[in-house]
Amino acid sequence: MDTINDNRSSPDFAGQVNRMFDRVAGRYDTLNGVMTAGLHHRWRERAADRAALGPGESALDVCCGTGDLAFELARRVAPGGRVVGCDFSEPMLDLAREKAAARGTEGVRFEWADALELPYDGERFDAVTVGFGVRNLADLDRGLREMARVLKPGGRLVILEITQPTRPPLSFFFSLWFDRIVPLLGAFSDEPEAYSYLPESVRSFPSPHGLAEKMDRAGFRGVRYTVLAGGIIAIHSGAKGA
């Protein structure tokens, strides 16, 4: 079993994260519910709202996991629109496809892709979204540049991600929950590294302001972010420059 060392310069970092998500795919939705107290659905709705999509438009959901954000986007582009959900974990994609079939969702498909080398033509999508995925990228700057590349001029990037609050009392709660309770839950799981990786990945991720600066350097304009849940969640958005 891999123990993930959050050293993104390691040549096997992406492979370790990929294998972890492959193994936990069947329990991913349950993990999300436990770790977010069931609030992740509402946060995805708000991220989809920020994408400001309309009927007939197109969207790419990067690191789509089991598809929940892609389904929110599909509702907004119907009728006539299309959504592509991509991920590097085939077991996650299989679950997303099963959900789509069970729901009868139209206008959305799920396919394998590397977020650092997206297999799509430039200037193809009206919006690109990422829900709880950018902190897993081995090279965040490169990933942002790829998302900018596939967006149409003026197209919108929306990122929903966990962040680390810096002020009490939320900073105390964050430390207690993510550094103590979540890893403790992992002790009773057959995939403890998934529980320990979460707080490690959040600690190493840029602050909301730091992520906004990276988006600006990647060519996005009008970058803004909203902090939710007392400072634990951030939604960033920006438009691709002409």
Image (spheres, helix red, strand yellow):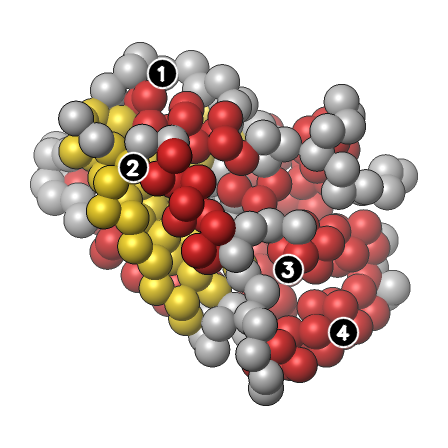
Q: Are marks 4 and 3 in contact (CB under 8 Å)?
A: no
Residue drawn 29% across the image and 37% down it: 220
Residue 70 in sight: no
Local packing at callout 1 (Cα closer than 10 Å; few below 14, some 14-19, many 20+) is some
* SS of the residue under disc 2: strand
Instruction: State which tag comes first along the sequence, 4 or 2.
Output: 4
Amino acid type, mark 3: Leu
CA distance for labels 4 and 2: 37 Å
The residue at which mark 3 appears reads as 31
| Mark drawn on residue 120 | 1
CA distance for labels 4 and 1: 40 Å
CA distance for labels 1 and 2: 19 Å
In terms of image quadrants, where is residue 242? top left
* SS of the residue under disc 4: helix
- Front residue (pair 136, 54): 136
Amino acid type, mark 4: Ile
Instruction: State which tag comes first along the sequence, 4 or 3.
Output: 3
| Mark drawn on residue 220 | 2
* SS of the residue under disc 3: helix
